[in-house]
Each structure stands twice: as C-alpha cells, then as structure tokens.
Amino acid sequence: MAVKIRLRRGGKIKQPSYRIIAADSRSPRDGRFLEILGFYNPMSTPATIEIKEDRIRYWLERGAIPTDTVKSLLHKKGIATP
C-alpha cells in the first residue's frame, strides 16, 4: 500500500476549503483516508494553513509521499520534505 499525503476538498460551492490527509494512493480524492493531518483554507486573507507537524513527520518517515501542492504548503510552514 502506497500512502500519499494529499488534499481532500470540503466547503461550499465556489468556497473551497481542504483537509490535509494521509490516504492510500488508490482511494478517490474525497474517499477513505487514514488520518487528518491538517487544514488549508485558500479563501481567507491570508490563506490559513494548520498542520500537525508531528503526525506529518511520522508519515514521511514511513514513506508517505506528499503531492506537489501539499509539498509547497509544507515548505511555506517550514517543514522539510524528502
């Protein structure tokens, strides 16, 4: 099983908000997930990013692969990714 750290969409029409999750790479975007790792709201000014750093590091140590978008969010928060 390959684990990815990616975004899961929520919110209303034209007002997206996202949860940062760890999920099996085969599951759909808004399908089953393993754990909620944070929150991202691009609609607020400035954009809100809340991340559980210890859990992100846990999943990265176990081989989870962040998507490009999540990797850029982690970089903004100062969390190094492999």
Image: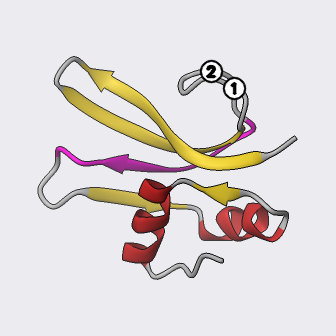
Q: Position of residue 67 (x, y in %)?
A: 54, 53
Question: In the image, which disc is placed on residue 31?
Answer: 2
Main SS of the magenta segment? Answer: strand
Q: Position of residue 57 (x, y in %)?
A: 70, 71
Q: Are marks 1 and 2 in contact (CB under 8 Å)?
A: yes
Q: How is the image coloured?
A: secondary structure
Q: Is residue 26 left or right of residue 36?
A: right
Q: Which residues are magenta?
A: 34-43
User: Residue flagged by tag 1: what amino acid is it?
Assistant: Ser
Q: Is residue 82 left or right of residue 40?
A: right
- Nearest to viewer (mark 1 / mark 2): 1
Quick one: label 1, few (<14), some, or many (20+) residues within 10 Å?
A: few
Q: Please, is residue 6 above or below residue 25 in the view?
A: below
- Seen as rendered, the residue at the extreme left is 45
Q: CA distance from mark 1 to mark 2?
A: 6 Å
Q: Please, is residue 62 above or below residue 9 in the view?
A: below
Q: Please, is residue 76 above or below residue 10 in the view?
A: below
Q: What secondary structure is marked by label 2?
A: loop
Is residue 59 rendered magenta in the image?
no
Q: Is residue 20 left or right of residue 65?
A: left
Number of numbered discs visible in the structure rendering = 2
Q: What secondary structure is marked by label 1?
A: loop
Is residue 39 rendered magenta in the image?
yes
Rendered residue at 66%/64% (across/down): 56
Q: Position of residue 18 (x, y in %)?
A: 40, 39
Question: In the image, which disc is placed on residue 27?
Answer: 1
User: Residue flagged by tag 2: what amino acid is it?
Assistant: Gly
